[in-house]
């Protein structure tokens, strides 16, 4: 019997729950009747073939939406692929498996295993799970194309600027490199897309008068104390803003210090800085809260968070403009060099694992330069005191014998 619209209409189950009727002219092409729930008869077109000694079956579609002629044409395509040595059913099964591996599901897995600091992880999460690639999250990862990525990068560039777009692009490219290593993707669709300009690194360094103006503009509130500590420690704003009492052992002892744990440092390395008198006075002026270990902020577990609002107020009071809170860190590092502190000591203060400790040098040189760091911070605090008080220096800069 040739399967046509008229012939299949007369087919019945005859007491069976499932029956397949094959076409006499196209081997493997069939019409399936199956008893469904409520006594409803399900009608569909199928193709059946043998591959590697096993019978395989491919569903072409429901007979309610696919005509006999269209089903026959589809069957010929499937059987043609079989004749060429392919296995359509295995390919279909493989496709179903790949469809479950959406971009979002793999991004979640990637981020959950990413061994980076909390700061870096927050950035990656923002770039990968935020609005930038959200329209692509439901796509199977192997179907994300260069065109898809390029289109989203254009949107991010237009809405958030080229710097954010460049970082977002880099984050996605790193993810796809991981997916390829894990055998979850065959290509990186980020390669070949336009690379947004990342912009020049900031070079803003506050002058001594500007630094003095900022210091005097700091109030006796959380933000004012944080900014002054940033000037004294050359730390990152989140590190000081999230400072906890647990990180400040021996405040009343002979060697007070700030011990930044690895989970709060950008590079994932613990960092210790000695507490000089001016910094110690600021710390001791912070009232302790019974229910909160953080020195600053009122509710957030990250500590102080009202950066934008308070920075605008600081700008207005100080009269110093066109600088970010992070520019203070660069300014302090520059001025430490100006007053004679050696570059490797400045890097130690900044908790940088570069320069003299990059590569094999850092593996063998594990010194924390504790005495040198203490001397440098004492020298720097004395310099700050002379600026903000207009007084004379108490600590004289050390100059090696024979130096100019």
Image (tube, rainbow, N blue to C red):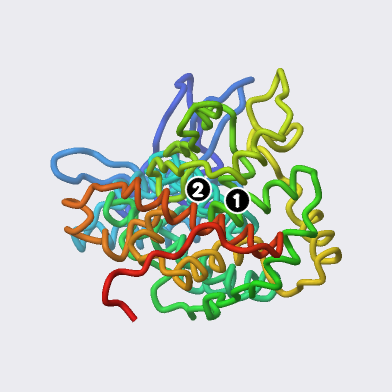
Q: Residue at x 71, y 34 (%)?
A: 286
Helix or strand or loop: what does disc 1 sit on? loop
Q: Residue at x 30, y 66 (%)?
A: 355
Q: Reply above or below: 390 against 115.
A: below
Q: Reply above or below: 285 against 102.
A: above
Residue wearing tag 1:
65
- Who is closer to the viewer here, 311 or 35? 311
Helix or strand or loop: what does disc 2 sit on? strand
Furthest residue in direction left, as rendered: 53
| Residue 357 x/y as whole percent | 26, 59
Asked if labels 2 and 1 touch by Cβ distance under 8 angstroms, the answer is yes
387 displayed left or right of 394: right
| Residue 32 x/y as whole percent | 45, 38
| Residue 350 x/y as whole percent | 44, 56
73 displayed left or right of 319: left
Q: CA distance from mark 1 to mark 2?
A: 8 Å
Q: Residue at x 46, y 45 (%)?
A: 265
Quadrant housing the C terminus? bottom left
Q: Residue at x 35, y 44 (%)?
A: 93
Q: Please identify the quarter of the rendering in which residue 325 is found.
A: bottom right
**Residue 384 in sight in this render:** yes
Badge count: 2
Residue wearing tag 2:
61
Q: Classify mark 2: residues with Cα within 10 Å, few (<14), some (14-19) or many (20+).
A: some
| Residue 153 x/y as whole percent | 57, 71
**Residue 138 in sight in this render:** no
- Who is closer to the viewer here, 60 or 383? 383
- Who is closer to the viewer here, 1 or 70? 70
- Which disc is residue 129 wearing? none
- Who is closer to the viewer here, 308 or 195? 308
Q: Reply above or below: 337 against 59.
A: below
């Amino acid at each position: 019997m040739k399967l046509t619209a008229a012939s299949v209409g007369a087919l019945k189950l005859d007491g069976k729950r499932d029956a397949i009727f094959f076409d006499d002219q196209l081997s493997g092409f069939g019409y399936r009747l199956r008893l469904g729930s409520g006594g409803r008869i399900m009608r569909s077109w199928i193709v059946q073939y043998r591959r590697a000694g096993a019978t395989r079956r491919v569903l072409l579609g429901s007979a309610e939406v696919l005509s006999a002629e269209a089903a026959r044409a589809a069957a010929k395509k499937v059987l043609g692929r079989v004749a060429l040595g392919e296995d359509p059913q295995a390919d279909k099964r493989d496709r179903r498996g790949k469809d479950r591996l959406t971009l979002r599901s793999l991004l979640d897995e990637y981020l959950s295993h990413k061994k980076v600091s909390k700061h870096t992880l927050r950035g990656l999460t923002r770039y990968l799970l935020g609005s930038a690639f959200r329209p692509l999250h439901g796509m199977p990862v192997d179907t994300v194309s260069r065109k898809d990525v390029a289109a989203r990068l254009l949107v991010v560039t237009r809405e958030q600027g080229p710097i954010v777009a460049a970082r977002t692009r880099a984050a996605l490219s790193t993810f796809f490199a991981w997916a390829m290593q894990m055998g979850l993707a065959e290509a990186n669709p980020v390669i070949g897309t336009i690379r947004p300009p990342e912009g020049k690194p900031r070079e803003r360094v506050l002058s001594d008068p500007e630094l003095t103006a900022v210091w005097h503009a700091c109030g006796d509130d959380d933000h004012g104390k944080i900014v002054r500590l940033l000037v004294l420690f050359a730390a990152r704003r989140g590190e000081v803003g999230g400072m906890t009492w647990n990180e400040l052992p021996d405040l009343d002892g002979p060697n007070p210090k700030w011990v930044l744990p690895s989970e709060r440092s950008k590079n994932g390395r613990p960092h210790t800085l000695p507490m000089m008198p001016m910094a110690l006075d600021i710390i001791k002026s912070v009232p302790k809260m019974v229910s909160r270990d953080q020195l600053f902020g009122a509710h957030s577990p990250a500590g102080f968070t009202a950066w934008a609002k308070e920075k605008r107020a600081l700008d207005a009071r100080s009269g110093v403009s066109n600088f970010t809170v992070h520019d203070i860190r660069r300014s302090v590092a520059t001025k430490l060099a100006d007053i004679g502190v050696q570059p490797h000591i400045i890097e130690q203060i900044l908790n940088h694992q570069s320069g003299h400790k990059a590569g094999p040098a850092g593996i063998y040189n594990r010194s924390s330069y504790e005495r040198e760091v203490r001397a440098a911070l004492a020298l720097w605090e004395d310099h700050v005191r002379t600026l903000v008080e207009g007084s004379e220096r108490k600590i004289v800069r050390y100059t090696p014998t024979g130096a100019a």
